[in-house]
Image: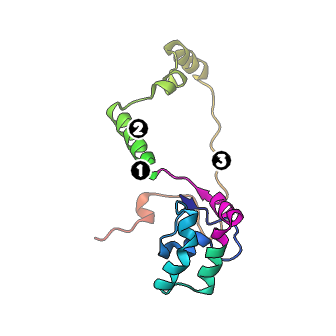
Amino acid sequence: MIHDPSTAWRGPYPYEVLAGAGVTPSTTQAELRDLTFELLERRMLTPRSQRAWSELRSLRGRLTADLLLYRVGLPEAVAGALEETERALAAPGVPPSAEASLALPWEGAVRLVDELDGVPLPEPPVPPEVPGFGGPPGEPGTHVRFDE
């Protein structure tokens, strides 16, 4: 589970403060009750860690902290994405779901070409000049300098 860093919390987030003592969302309330001894032993009992411990000790505080966590099944998600990618690479081409929308009947294409044959097209507009960027692009050699 991961914490959403964009959410507001009064002070430091308790799980982040107590991570050095091994506190995670799966830590039981009984383990959390005895945490002060662990914090004393590791010389981590500071006002900051005491406040975090106090917030997680109460049911209301613990549920509020847990509310800001997201369950992420990273190994499963990666395995699923890898499987899907390998499947897609094994059968290159247009996916069956897109074939119908990409298919243009031959007769329709011929009719479209016949309709547009001889239709005058206007010249494309020249983009406005942007200060500091000069005019439209020229030949590649005018923008790139090659060592001779």
> Can you give x and y, in whole percent of width and height, for residue 125 in the image?
65, 47
Quadrant of the image containing the C terminus: bottom left
Q: Give me the disc on residue 91.
A: none
The amino acid type of the residue labelled 1 equals Pro
Disc nearest the viewer among 2 and 3 = 2
The answer to whether mark 1 and mark 3 are in CB contact below 8 A is no
Residue under the point 63% across and 60% down: 66
> Which residue is label 2 attached to?
84
Residue 125 disc label: 3
- Compute the Cα span from label 1 to label 3: 52 Å
Locate residue 127, reporting x and y percent: 65, 54
Residue toward you, 41 or 1: 41
Question: Which is the main secondary structure of the residues drawn in magenta?
Answer: helix
Task: Bin the neighbour count of mark 1 within 10 Å (Cα to Cα): few under 14, some 14-19, many 20 and up.
Answer: few
Q: Which residue is mark 1?
A: 75
Q: Whole-Å distance between the Cαs marked 1 and 2?
A: 14 Å
| Magenta range | 55-73
Query: Which image quadrant is residue 2 in?
Result: bottom right
- Say which residue appears at 70% left-offset and 68% top-offset: 8
Q: Which of marks 2 and 1 precedes in the sequence?
A: 1
Q: Return the disc, 1 or 3, that comes first in the chain's sequence.
A: 1
